[in-house]
Image (spheres, rainbow, N blue to C red):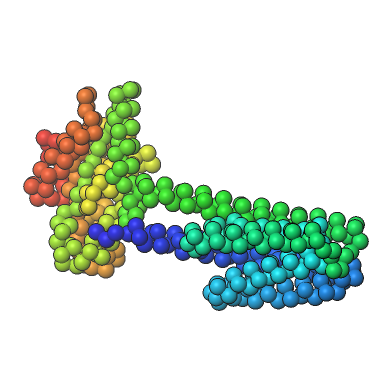
Amino acid sequence: MADHSGAVTSASRRERGVKFWRVTRRVCQLAATIDISFFFLFLFLGSPILAWINVASVAMYTAAYYAINRRQNRLAIALIWSEVIIHSALGTLMIGWESGFHYYLLMFIPTVCISSVRPGTIISLIVVLWGYYIGLDILMWFMEPFQPIPSGALLGVHLFNLSVVFAMFAYLSFFYMRMVVSAQRKLQRLATVDSLTGLLNRRHGSDLAENEIARFRRVGHPVAFMLLDVDHFKSFNDQFGHGTGDAILTEIGRLIPAQLRVQDIAARWGGEEFLVILPDTKIESALASAERIRVALRSNDWKQATGESIDVTISVGVSEVCANDDLASVISRADRALYRGKAGGRNRVEQEGELQR
């Protein structure tokens, strides 16, 4: 079968990128709104130079927003970096370090760290940012602001900048947290779910099977197993190609759970073979469940699912956990029943030692 792990990883990476640029657009909108507020504030404080600097900033954020919409991401990043670096420096030089404009530089640290550039480039950018920040700080030790404003107004600007940066850090942190949680869930899914069929993979299916056998040993609740194998699967691949084979397996991954109870567990056991675990189920009920699955696959419209006029059937072996059984022994009995069904003509359900039709 085709390896779908690379496609899943690429899709996950694309999804993270889409989310990142969506947040970046929102940041551009928020930053432009803040700069508009600063325009009127500095006009009111009698600092027209700083007021018109904010007009230029609004223009740069607007350009960055539309660049992202047009997928000109490098241009957008260049505009955002330039605006923050220049604006923070001009604001600090004009009205002083106490204004808090330098706080905006700190927002680049988490953004750089989660970027897709090489680790060496990330370190270089962080070092350059640190050097710029320290240099601006030291510079303000030896010079007075070019256009100071009253102390009360300066305090207001400082608190406003601090609050805005705090809010934006909180927003970005929430976004990064959601990205991490989403990535963890996807990794967990990749570790437990078969990417083609959507059923559990063999490793996770084995773990859950062991849990059910352990529960049987503790409390004696019955548990049954089905081993299902697609009849003549190799001929479908040979005649129609692996794409059709994948489509068959995907459709089976949909059909099997539809015939089971909520508590039943279905896993892709390997290739075209599937395992179903039936907790609190004796052999008679397990055989009935297996027959429902067999009939559902036999009567399914496979042309709609695969695009080919084919008939797909399965053979099923059923076993029930007995005293002193382990996973290997109960699966082995189901496997023997399955292959007796294959030898008997396929498209049938059997338990060990008895034909079930």
Tell me if residue 35 can be seen. Answer: no
Image position of 42 (left or right of 72): right
Q: Check the picture and name the quadrant holding the N terminus.
A: bottom left
Identify the residue at horizontal 35%, vertical 52% (top origin). Answer: 198
Q: In the depicted view, which residue is nearer to us: 30 or 304?
A: 30
Residue 187 locus on image (x, y percent): 42, 50
Q: Residue at x 85, y 63 (%)?
A: 144
Asked if residue 275 can be seen in this view, the reply is yes
Q: Percent position (x, y) of residue 51? A: 82, 72
Q: Quadrant of the C terminus?
A: top left
Is residue 71 depicted above or below 113 in this figure? below
The front one of 283 and 329 is 329
- For the residue pair 233 and 315, the one nearer the viewer reads as 233
Q: Position of residue 136 (x, y in %)?
A: 73, 62
Identify the residue at the far left of this view. 343
Q: Residue at x 74, y 59 (%)?
A: 138
Is residue 67 rendered to the left or right of residue 50? left
Q: Residue furthest front?
A: 142
Quarter residue 287 falls in: top left
Left or right placement of residue 252 versus residue 70 in this view? left
Q: Quadrant of residue 27?
A: bottom right
The percent position of residue 80, horizontal first and vertical second, equals: 64, 69
Q: Is residue 121 above or below residue 345?
A: below
Q: Residue 220 appears in which quarter of the rendering?
A: top left
What is the tally of numbered marks visible in this picture? Answer: 0
